[in-house]
Amino acid sequence: MESSIVLRKWLEYANDFNFVKDYLSELLEYNKNEKITGSFLIGDSMLSCLEGFNLAKPYALKWLQIYGDSEEAFFVVSSYCRAIEKLKLNPECISEVKEFIIPCLKRNYKYISPNDSWKWRQNILLKHSDDWEP
């Protein structure tokens, strides 16, 4: 999990995807079936830059097929939706994770307080939830 944070910060601030691409590819491949580590690594990779999103996207979609009903899916789905907005990608790409949005909200909504550092994740899922009411 710590390595995913370091990689995300490197990609965000150093803006040097080529420097970490091979390492990131290896980490994604190695952790693709890990529920917790995989979710953080995939989520952080998608939020970093367009190249990180493109590299992590197939892992995210496959990971969601395995763990889409877990609490950790909240991190992957919200990161995916935020990356679409942040990187100004086609909003229709959200349809690829649409089936997971409301289940993620239902599982995690009551655990996130207004001051929670993950509130933005909840807000972005609410934005794409077709008017789901808690």
Image (tube, rainbow, N blue to C red):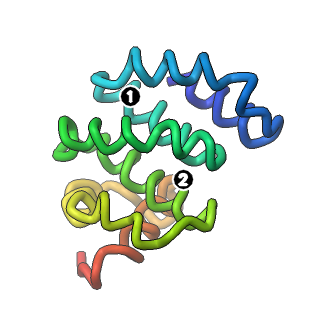
In the depicted structure, whether residue 108 falls above or below residue 35: below
Residue closest to the eye, 69 or 63: 63
In the structure shown, which secondary structural element does the residue marked by tag 2 occupy?
loop
Q: Position of residue 120 (x, y in %)?
A: 51, 63
Residue tagged by mark 2?
Answer: 117
Q: Name the quadrant containing residue 53.
A: top right
Q: Residue shown at 72%/36% (left/top)?
A: 11
Judging by the rendered image, the residue that carries numbered circle 1 is: 38
> Where, quadrant-wise, is the C terminus in this rendering?
bottom left
Task: Determine the residue positioned at 40% across, 25% down.
Answer: 37
Q: Position of residue 44 (x, y in %)?
A: 54, 39
| Amino acid at dot 1 | Gly
Q: Position of residue 114 (x, y in %)?
A: 47, 66
Circle nearer the viewer, 2 or 1: 1
Q: Residues within 10 Å of mark 1 (few under 14, many from 20)?
A: many
Q: For this view, does 76 lie left or right of residue 79?
A: left
Q: Secondary structure at mark 1?
A: helix
Q: Residue at x 74, y 31 (%)?
A: 10
